[in-house]
Image (cartoon, rainbow, N blue to C red):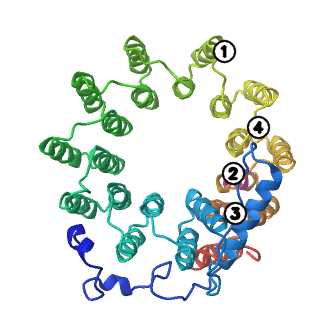
């Protein structure tokens, strides 16, 4: 589909047979999918008033309950828009598209490119390129002209799923539209997608095209390239790009550049290189932030350089950098890996003493460390703390603690935690099932493991399947 031809005339059903396929949301029909949407609740923001939170949650829940009905066409705008915003933010793409379908039925609805841009970006992050393509068709059918933001979001949706032929084709289509030509942000998004899939051979093509069109790289473009090379451990190319950035004269390295370079060398264990470039950036006038210090702490911890790790913490204190939950999580994880439970507990207590609430990552680190040492009583203690707290638990935490009890041979407790996942609205993934099947097989409970495997397959085919009765 060419954007230039799609603008002047609405999409034809003969030219676009894919419109006859039934997408997640219904465009030309009032039918709705009978499957109930999954709601995991909102994560509360402490600054919001409790009554306001409850009203908002109730309003959003009411909207979600109405997405499968034909009769609600005069809903309050604020409620529908808030529900759509929340579903989009939480990346619940199926629910978001259903709410959007409900939104389009309202008598006050006016199509806006900003709404389509947000939805397309969400679909890209959820790797749903087909739905993004259908949504773009809907936008054109509503008479909206594609904007740079909308088309860039579509490029991102294709690129983040590795569909580079469609991504580049969309960029080519943009060039044919007078007020929708790709800009530096479009190409930066394309480069980022290429980096994530390690298609570095395409980056040269993108840069050449930008040069031909007279589009200069921005700081964001350089940072995207440097970060991509760094994560792929292509250090020579990373430093070459950094040199090009400095020599450009118009794009100076910033804190994002610093963190990408320091992280690249730190994660690969090249501590001397990491320290060298940290000093180089200080000379260039780029000052470290809390993320930089977290990177240094993690790098030193992985290298077993605990004194240097402590020196970074001391430096932060002298320079009035307040450690964050992330900082403490890293320190707790590093000491836990080393089996230094005394230090791990010390920083865990210090974290709570400073008024910082441990999160699921904190507890995962503690459970993993105690599990490796076979200290099951300490895991019991951690579990009691979690139950008595308001921490928002997630699937990785349950995977972690299920694994701990499974390794300890406590099959009964493992099963209880598996059922607890449903009450906490945590959906088991492949790791959950693999961990439990391994534990059952280790105990000689082969038939139970086989039943669990069947349940896993059933839940994949029918996402709404309940876990009770596994």
N-terminal of the two: label 1 or label 4? 1
Disc 2 to disc 1, how far (Cα)?
Answer: 31 Å
Say which of 59 and 90 sits in front.
59
**Category of crowding for the residue at label 3, using alpha-carbon neighbours closer than 10 angstroms: few (below 14), some (14–19), many (at least 20):** few
What segment is highlighted magenta in the picture? 399-404
**Category of crowding for the residue at label 4, using alpha-carbon neighbours closer than 10 angstroms: few (below 14), some (14–19), many (at least 20):** some
Q: Position of residue 390 (x, y in %)?
A: 81, 48
Q: Which label is found at residue 40?
A: 3
N-terminal of the two: label 4 or label 3? 3
**Category of crowding for the residue at label 1, using alpha-carbon neighbours closer than 10 angstroms: few (below 14), some (14–19), many (at least 20):** few
**Category of crowding for the residue at label 2, using alpha-carbon neighbours closer than 10 angstroms: few (below 14), some (14–19), many (at least 20):** many
Helix, strand, or loop for circle 3? loop
Helix, strand, or loop for circle 1? helix
Which quadrant of the figure contains the C terminus? bottom right
Apparent side of residue 160 relative to residue 75 in the rendered image (left or right): left
Q: Position of residue 320 (x, y in %)?
A: 65, 15
Disc 2 to disc 3, how far (Cα)?
Answer: 16 Å
Asked whether the beta carbons under mark 4 and mark 2 sit within 8 Å of each other, the answer is: no
Helix, strand, or loop for circle 4? loop
Disc 4 to disc 3, how far (Cα)?
Answer: 21 Å
Mark toward the viewer: 2 or 3: 3
- When asked about the image quadrant of residue 462, the answer is bottom right
Residue position marked by numbered label 2 in the rendering: 397
Residue position marked by numbered label 4 in the rendering: 357
């Amino acid at each position: 589909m060419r954007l230039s031809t799609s603008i002047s005339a609405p999409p034809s059903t003969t030219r676009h047979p894919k419109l006859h396929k039934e997408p997640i949301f219904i465009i030309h029909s009032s039918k709705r999918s009978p499957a109930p949407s999954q709601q995991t609740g909102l994560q509360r923001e402490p600054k919001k008033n409790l009554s306001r939170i409850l009203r908002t949650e109730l309003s959003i829940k009411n909207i979600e309950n109405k997405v499968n009905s034909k009769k609600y066409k005069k809903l309050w705008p604020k409620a529908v828009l808030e529900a759509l915003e929340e579903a989009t933010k939480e990346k619940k793409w199926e629910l978001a598209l259903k709410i959007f379908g409900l939104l389009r039925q309202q008598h006050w609805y006016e199509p806006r490119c900003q709404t389509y841009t947000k939805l397309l970006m969400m679909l890209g992050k959820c790797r749903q390129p087909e739905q993004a393509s259908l949504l773009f068709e809907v936008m054109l059918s509503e008479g909206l002209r594609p904007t740079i933001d909308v088309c860039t979001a579509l490029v991102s949706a294709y690129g983040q799923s590795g569909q580079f032929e469609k991504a580049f084709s969309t960029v080519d289509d943009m060039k044919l539209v007078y007020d929708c030509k790709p800009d530096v942000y479009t190409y930066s998004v394309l480069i980022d997608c290429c980096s994530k899939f390690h298609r570095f051979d395409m980056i040269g093509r993108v840069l050449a095209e930008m040069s031909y069109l007279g589009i200069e790289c921005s700081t964001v473009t350089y940072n995207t390239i440097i970060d991509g090379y760094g994560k792929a451990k292509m250090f020579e190319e990373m430093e070459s790009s950094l040199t090009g950035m400095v020599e450009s004269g118009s794009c100076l390295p910033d804190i994002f550049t610093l963190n990408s370079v320091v992280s690249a060398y730190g994660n690969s264990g090249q501590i001397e290189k990491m320290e060298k470039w940290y000093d180089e950036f200080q000379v260039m006038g780029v000052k470290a932030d809390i993320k930089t210090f977290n990177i240094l702490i993690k790098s030193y911890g992985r290298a077993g350089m605990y004194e240097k790790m402590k020196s970074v913490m001391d430096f932060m204190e002298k320079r009035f950098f307040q450690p964050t939950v992330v900082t403490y999580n890293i320190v707790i994880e590093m000491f836990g890996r080393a089996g230094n439970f005394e230090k791990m507990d010390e920083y865990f207590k210090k974290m709570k003493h400073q008024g910082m609430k441990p999160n699921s990552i904190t507890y995962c680190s503690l459970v993993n460390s105690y599990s490796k040492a076979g200290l099951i009583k300490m895991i019991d203690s951690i579990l009691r703390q979690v139950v008595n707290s308001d921490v928002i638990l997630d699937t990785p935490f349950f995977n972690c603690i299920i694994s701990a009890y499974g390794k300890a041979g406590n099959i009964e407790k493992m099963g209880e935690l598996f059922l607890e996942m449903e009450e906490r609205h945590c959906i088991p993934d492949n790791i959950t099932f693999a961990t439990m099947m391994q534990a059952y097989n280790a105990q000689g409970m082969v038939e139970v493991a086989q039943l669990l495997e069947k349940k896993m397959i059933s839940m994949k085919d029918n996402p709404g399947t309940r876990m009770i009765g596994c």
